[in-house]
């Protein structure tokens, strides 16, 4: 059930977010290009670096999310078996043993979520680092253009305001990659379960 829900959330929300992020990125880059094409060319190399980071973390996180779903399934199985067979558990005085099974499955799930959290605690700072490097590059070239009289301060202010709309979708893509990795792992589990049942 959880696998199906993760796929549903990605299709209902993740795809819309991805479309919005791509649309905002393309529109922002177009406006920036018409505002000052020289400065726009300086930030274009940063975008493929950010996309490579997203792809790398997507590949690394999908197996982790697959294991999260597997461990959640084991936890739910223990819970379901105990609720369905509560009379048998009580008849044979197996409560401490079953509680131990539940706690062990819960600890394994917790440990796996910690691994996922560690990976994403690297992803988002890296995304912001790429964004800050972009800001530094823009500031360097804009300062040079202003001093040489190629652009004025007002044009730089306008450019820097539109620049926010380039880096905002990059942050959104981090969330989308997380949703995509979870949905991919869940879809893989669902398809393998249906092939086993058939």
Image: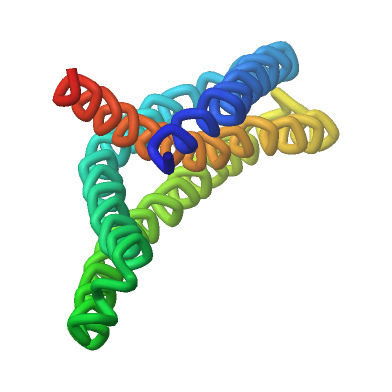
Residue 50 visible in the displayed image? no
Q: Nearer the viewer, residue 42 or 183?
A: 183
Residue depicted at x 49% and y 35%: 176
Q: Is residue 147 above or below residue 75?
A: above
Looking at the image, how many numbered discs can be counted on the residues?
0
Relative placement, left or right, of 193 versus 46 is left
Image point (23%, 88%), residue name: 96
Which residue is nearer to you in this view: 161 or 38?
161
Above or below, 112 against 8 in this view is: below
50 sits to left or right of 189: right
Residue 169 in the image, given as x and y percentages of width and height: 60, 33
Q: Position of residue 108 (x, y in %)?
A: 22, 68
Which residue is located at x 39 percent, y 29 percent?
A: 51
Figure quadrant of residue 87: bottom left
Which x, y percent locates residue 52? Answer: 32, 30
Query: Please, which residue is most extreme toward the right here?
Result: 154
Residue 187 against residue 60 in the figure, above or below: above
Residue farthest to the left, as pictured: 196
Q: Is residue 93 visible?
A: yes
Quadrant in which residue 109 is drawn: bottom left
**Residue 112 percent across, percent down from the top left:** 26, 61
Q: Nearer the viewer, residue 63 or 39?
A: 63
Nearest the eye: 152 or 60: 60
Q: Is residue 16 above or below residue 74?
A: above
- Quadrant of the snapshot with the C terminus: top left
In the visual, does 96 lie left or right of 167? left
Q: Residue at x 42, y 39 (%)?
A: 1
- Left or right? Give the position of 97 relative to 72: left
């Amino acid at each position: 059930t959880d696998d199906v829900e993760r796929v549903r959330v990605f299709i209902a929300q993740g795809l819309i977010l991805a479309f919005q992020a791509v649309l905002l990125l393309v529109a922002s880059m177009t406006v920036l290009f018409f505002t000052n094409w020289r400065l726009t060319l300086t930030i274009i190399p940063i975008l493929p670096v950010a996309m490579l980071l997203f792809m790398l973390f997507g590949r690394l996180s999908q197996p982790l999310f697959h294991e999260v779903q597997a461990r959640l399934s084991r936890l739910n199985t223990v819970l379901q078996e105990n609720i369905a067979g509560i009379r048998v558990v009580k008849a044979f005085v197996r409560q401490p043993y079953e509680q131990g099974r539940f706690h062990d499955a819960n600890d394994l799930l917790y440990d796996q979520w910690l691994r996922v959290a560690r990976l994403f605690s690297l992803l988002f700072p890296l995304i912001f680092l790429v964004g800050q490097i972009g800001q530094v590059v823009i500031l360097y070239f804009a300062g040079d253009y202003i001093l040489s009289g190629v652009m004025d301060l007002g044009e730089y202010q306008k450019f820097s305001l539109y620049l926010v709309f380039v880096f905002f979708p990059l942050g959104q893509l981090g969330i989308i990659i997380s949703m995509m990795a979870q949905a991919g792992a869940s879809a893989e589990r669902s398809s393998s379960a249906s092939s086993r049942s058939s």
